[in-house]
Image (cartoon, rainbow, N blue to C red):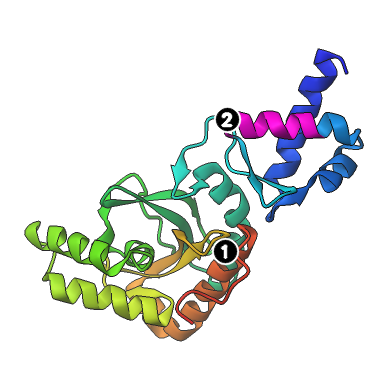
Amino acid sequence: MSSGRGSERVLLLLEWLAGQTRAVTLAEASAALDAPKSSVLNLLRMLVEMGYAEREGESAYRLVRLPGEVAAGHVLQGTLLRRCEPAVRTAVAASKESGFIAVVDGAYVRYLCKILPDREIRYDRNIEIPRRTVQVSSGVAILTGLSDAALADEATRAEAEGLGEAAALVARVQEARAAGYAVTKRGVVEGAAGVAAPILDAKGKVVGALNIAGPAARLADNLEEIIDIVRAGAAEASAALGWRGAAHGA
């Protein structure tokens, strides 16, 4: 196999792996590339050695990152955005409100994408403004993945910053964990509200949140419907990352 052909195949393999939501076998990869198993095996081993893929069991492989991607938990942010954005678009179309994918960066929420609905009055959040996790529904949804000890530490830090009593913050996250979603009826921005549900990776770890936000009065009028849309969207996004278990909080 020439070096040129080998370079083409490794790029094709990376592209194909990026679209898979589960670990794949050598036979599947060989068939997808229409290439000999021996050649594809060498490429898969190279990707594992370079940290782009990992072995799963005895005979399966899963892509864990693409060149230049930054990690969000155990999922790369590029992978998270690429696989979960369709679920956000579906949720935006169903709710007719603004949709976001959120991850946690230290003590703050960072938004990977913003998708606006096709309507005259819409909530166009400035996603460059940093927001503490405990202040927004997407942050609370992601905090549901923390252990009790880690959650207590985060609540204590938030209390020291004047963001609320630690016990109340813990109670809010625990309530969201049990329900499977978080609601902020009055957000950081006056007149805005949001609903968010956690996105899980293939191992059931919370790696982000799907968030629908809009004018507080309008969300209040349609809250139950929005909650159902957000939970369904987060489940769809989690499935796109390979999660096959029950919905978080169910």
Secondary structure mainly formed by the magenta segment = helix
**Can you tell which mark lies on residue 219?**
none
Question: Which residue is tagged 2?
Answer: 67
Residue in the picture at 77% in, 29% down: 42
Question: Which residue is tagged 1?
Answer: 238
Quadrant of residue 243 within the rendered picture = bottom right
Q: Is residue 67 above or below residue 76?
A: above
Image position, residue 149 (x, y; %): 24, 65
Asked whether residue 185 is in view, the answer is no
Mark 1 residue crowding within 10 angstroms, few (<14) / some (14–19) / many (20+): many
Whole-number angstrom distance, CA of label 2 to CA of label 1: 23 Å
| In front of the other: 129 or 216 | 129
Q: Which residues are magenta?
A: 41-51
| In front of the other: 70 or 121 | 70
Residue in the picture at 27% in, 66% down: 187
| In front of the other: 221 or 185 | 185
